[in-house]
């Protein structure tokens, strides 16, 4: 291995192109059969470097060294090939020039001219290789032929002499043939080097199409960012991978602006995109289950000056924009407006799919966009998001529209949408027959005029808003997902009005209701909590409660579930009496609707406990149970097993005589989710469960005939011992009842957490002649 210890770069410092060319040509032959003295032994790669057996048996360190050497030789061969092709082009030009000159002679020379042309064409596909034993002589002859042509052309008498010109033309033909043979030899050398590299690097066995497919999958799952190269690092592995990656224009176009608006970087990446549709975005847009984007305003690219906007404008003029997520600070407001007007207002963008425009206002009142600024008719624009701004539009294919205000949450003046914007928004909505997703967040809408415009959106199925008035202006026959968030700090009138509005419009389709309370953990507004009322379309189960802790932005910007969700910010003084106070108020509002007869399931879920029960048998006084109005059709009540005090309070309330009478058809209790640490809660609740079962079986109402438990476990399905303990707990609760108990189990997956679990259904069949439980 003595040759590997020497550095070919050092040899190249004193080696000339002739010796480099000779060495690389020899690689195509069997090294051991070549007279090394003809080229200098230290320039040749050692035999074991190219032998497959030796290469395959290399250690890790040796393989790394071999790969480095092979790459060096590969680069040198490419360099020699480039040199020979350049020389070949010169000889071909001179040969063609000489033949054209011969063609100007008399007609008797036309046959000779055609014969020389034919010979020149035959040299393009040489049938024999060059003779390496005569390499120096042949190379010297090529150089001599070049010199002869130079002198021949400078001598007018010789240039116009047919016989001498024919001899020179024949010599040029031989030189061209030799150069083609040398290039072919270099190609064989290159192939041999590549075979050795493939043996050392199995990944090189993959063809370009396979590598491109793999790289595309990696690029999909590993996007680059300002702190991580992501899929771009694949181009740093080797030259072969880099070549494949540079040819994948679409992946470069998709992430052309992930590093921001830096002009140098964006120009370099856009050059690699070369005609593909470009996404102007710092991060990938994520889409929800319904196919609408979940906008995050950290994906916008902030532009600070005109120079940074020029690359985007260039792509727009070519019609190559797919996504446009742009932002500017308040001081660059007019600059971005001019850009938006040019890109979106003056010309149609045929491939534009989504637009996200954000203006960063620093607390003062929003400025108006000067008239006229109307968006052009972009045929494929499906998603729009405006933050602190609005641009009128009439788009035939729009699917989602998000309008967000990030002004001060405590200043209505800053959050007030200007009347011209509001009127333009209503006009835009009226023209958007295909709209399916509408979100207007933290804007305060202007006061209603005497003529309340009502707009019908026939296909809109998702809406998120912070103003009840928006809902009152819209007719939404296909609505199935809604998220409203409203302040009820001063009065609960909004709560009453919104609940009644929902039941008046959709009451016949509402079959379940989940009422939940969550702590609002915010230093800015720490005196409030959140009360959420979710109305579902199915009677088998209630909509899920909010995950803990609550994220207000997530509530409003993420795609809501298949239910109507009403979130209210209430004073913390009221949430201190959630069970006996807030839950009762909501139920009273709901019961006032005639559609309450279609309500079959109710869920209660509070995060803050209202009362602490130190002794379950004799609760400490004073404490108030929850008093429910009449729900004549409710058959199921859902409760969370989060803490003993809250569940005990709710079960105790359900066992009260008044509530038993107001829930005449209640026959099922559902506990969700039941975590592993909830086993102690179930054991402590045996007495209150027994009390409730006995109270209902003693009254002229439906008895509890079903108990459902949604069991969850971080490891998947619970252990059999845990399940057995729960079953024993249930049996203990009804041990004095002459009844048959049937257990049914089935696997489940929590849609919110993606945690596997088990559903346990306990069916209780009472004997007809049985005494009270």
Image: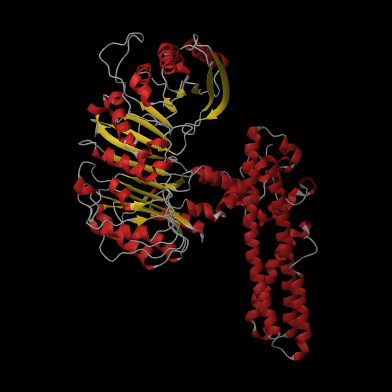
Left or right, 345 with respect to 274, comes to left
| Rendered image quadrant of residue 53 | top right
Which residue occupies the foreground of this view, 575 or 22? 575
Left or right, 233 with respect to 226, comes to right
The percent position of residue 660, horizontal first and vertical second, equals 38, 22
Is there any visible trace of residue 372 in the rendered image? Answer: yes
The percent position of residue 611, horizontal first and vertical second, equals 29, 17
The answer to whether residue 597 is above or below residue 122 is above
Q: Residue at x 29, y 26 (%)?
A: 578
The percent position of residue 658, horizontal first and vertical second, equals 33, 22
Q: How is the image coloured?
A: secondary structure
The answer to whether residue 12 is above or below residue 153 is above
Which residue occupies the foreground of this view, 37 or 118? 118
Q: Residue at x 63, y 38 (%)?
A: 65
Is there any visible trace of residue 442 in the rendered image? Answer: no
Which residue occupies the foreground of this view, 282 or 688? 688
Which residue occupies the foreground of this view, 97 or 139? 97
Left or right, 209 with respect to 618, comes to right
Left or right, 180 with respect to 623, comes to right
The percent position of residue 692, horizontal first and vertical second, equals 41, 16
- The mark total stands at 0
The answer to whether residue 14 is above or below residue 138 is above
Where, quadrant-wise, is the N terminus in this rendering? top right
Q: Residue at x 32, y 13 (%)?
A: 613
| Rendered image quadrant of residue 431 | bottom left
């Amino acid at each position: 291995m003595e040759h590997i210890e020497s550095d070919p770069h050092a040899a190249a410092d004193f080696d000339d192109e002739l010796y480099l060319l000779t060495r690389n040509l020899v690689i195509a032959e069997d090294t051991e059969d070549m007279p090394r003295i003809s080229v200098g032994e230290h320039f040749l790669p050692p035999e074991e470097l190219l032998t497959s057996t030796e290469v395959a048996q290399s250690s890790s360190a040796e393989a790394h060294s071999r790969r480095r050497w092979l790459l060096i030789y590969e680069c040198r061969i490419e360099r020699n090939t480039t040199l020979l092709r350049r020389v070949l082009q010169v000889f071909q030009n001179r040969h063609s020039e000489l033949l054209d000159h011969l063609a100007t002679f008399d007609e008797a020379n036309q046959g000779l001219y055609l014969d020389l042309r034919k010979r020149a064409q035959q040299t393009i596909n040489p049938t024999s290789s060059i003779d390496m034993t005569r390499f120096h002589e042949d190379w010297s002859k090529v150089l001599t032929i070049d010199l002869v042509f130079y002198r021949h052309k400078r001598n007018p008498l010789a240039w116009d002499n047919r016989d001498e010109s024919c001899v020179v033309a024949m010599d040029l033909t031989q030189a061209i043939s030799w150069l083609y043979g040398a290039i072919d030899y270099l190609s064989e050398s290159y192939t041999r080097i590549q075979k050795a590299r493939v043996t050392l690097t199995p990944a090189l066995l993959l063809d370009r199409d396979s590598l491109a497919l793999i790289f595309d999958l990696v690029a999909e799952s590993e996007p680059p960012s300002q702190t991580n190269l992501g899929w771009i690092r694949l181009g740093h592995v080797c030259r072969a991978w880099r070549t494949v990656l540079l040819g994948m224009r679409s992946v470069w176009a998709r992430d052309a602006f992930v590093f921001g608006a830096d002009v140098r970087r964006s120009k370099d990446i856009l050059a690699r995109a070369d005609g593909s549709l470009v996404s102007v975005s710092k991060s990938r847009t994520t889409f929800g289950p319904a196919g609408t984007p979940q906008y995050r305003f950290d994906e916008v690219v902030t532009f600070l000056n005109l120079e940074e906007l020029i690359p985007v404008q260039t792509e727009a003029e070519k019609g190559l924009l797919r996504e446009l997520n742009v932002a500017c600070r308040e001081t660059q407001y007019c600059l971005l407006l001019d850009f938006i007007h040019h890109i979106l207002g003056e010309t149609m963008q045929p491939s534009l799919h989504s637009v996200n425009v954000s203006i960063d206002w620093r607390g003062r009142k929003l400025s108006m966009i000067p008239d006229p600024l109307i968006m052009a008719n972009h045929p494929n624009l499906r998603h729009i998001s405006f933050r602190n701004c609005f641009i009128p539009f009439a788009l035939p294919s729009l699917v989602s529209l998000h309008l967000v205000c990030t002004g001060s949450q405590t200043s209505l003046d800053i959050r007030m949408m200007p009347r011209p914007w509001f009127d333009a928004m209503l006009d835009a909505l009226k023209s958007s027959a295909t709209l399916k997703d509408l979100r207007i967040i933290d804007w305060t809408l202007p006061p209603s005029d005497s003529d309340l415009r009502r707009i019908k959106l026939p296909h809109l199925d998702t809406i998120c808003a912070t103003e009840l008035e928006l809902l009152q202006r819209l007719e939404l026959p296909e609505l199935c997902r809604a998220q409203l968030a409203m302040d009820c700090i001063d009065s609960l009138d909004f709560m009453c009005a919104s609940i009644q509005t929902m039941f008046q419009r959709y009451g016949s389709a509402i079959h379940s209701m989940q009422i939940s309370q969550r702590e609002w953990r915010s230093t800015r507004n720490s005196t409030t909590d959140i009360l959420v009322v979710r109305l579902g379309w199915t009677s088998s189960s209630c909509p899920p409660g909010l995950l803990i802790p609550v994220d207000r932005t997530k509530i409003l910007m993420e795609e809501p579930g298949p239910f109507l969700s009403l979130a209210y910010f209430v004073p913390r003084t009221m949430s201190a009496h959630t069970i006996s106070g807030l839950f009762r108020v909501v139920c009273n509002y709901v019961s006032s609707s005639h559609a309450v007869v279609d309500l079959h399931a109710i869920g209660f879920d509070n995060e803050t406990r209202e009362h602490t029960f130190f002794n379950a048998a004799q609760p400490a006084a004073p404490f108030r149970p929850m008093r429910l109005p009449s729900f004549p059709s409710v058959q199921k009540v859902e409760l969370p097993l989060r803490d003993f005090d809250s569940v005990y309070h709710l079960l105790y309330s359900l066992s009260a005589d008044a509530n038993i009478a107001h829930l005449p058809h209640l026959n099922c209790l559902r506990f969700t989710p039941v975590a592993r640490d909830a086993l102690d809660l179930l054991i402590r609740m045996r007495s209150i469960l027994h009390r409730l079962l006995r109270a209902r079986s003693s009254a002229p109402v439906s008895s509890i005939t079903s108990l459902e438990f949604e069991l969850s476990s971080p490891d998947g399905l619970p252990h059999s011992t845990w399940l057995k303990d729960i079953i024993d707990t249930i049996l203990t609760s009804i041990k004095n009842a002459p009844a048959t108990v049937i257990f049914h189990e089935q696997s489940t997956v929590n849609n919110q957490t993606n945690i596997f679990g088990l559903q346990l259904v306990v069916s209780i069949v009472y004997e007809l002649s049985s005494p009270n439980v």
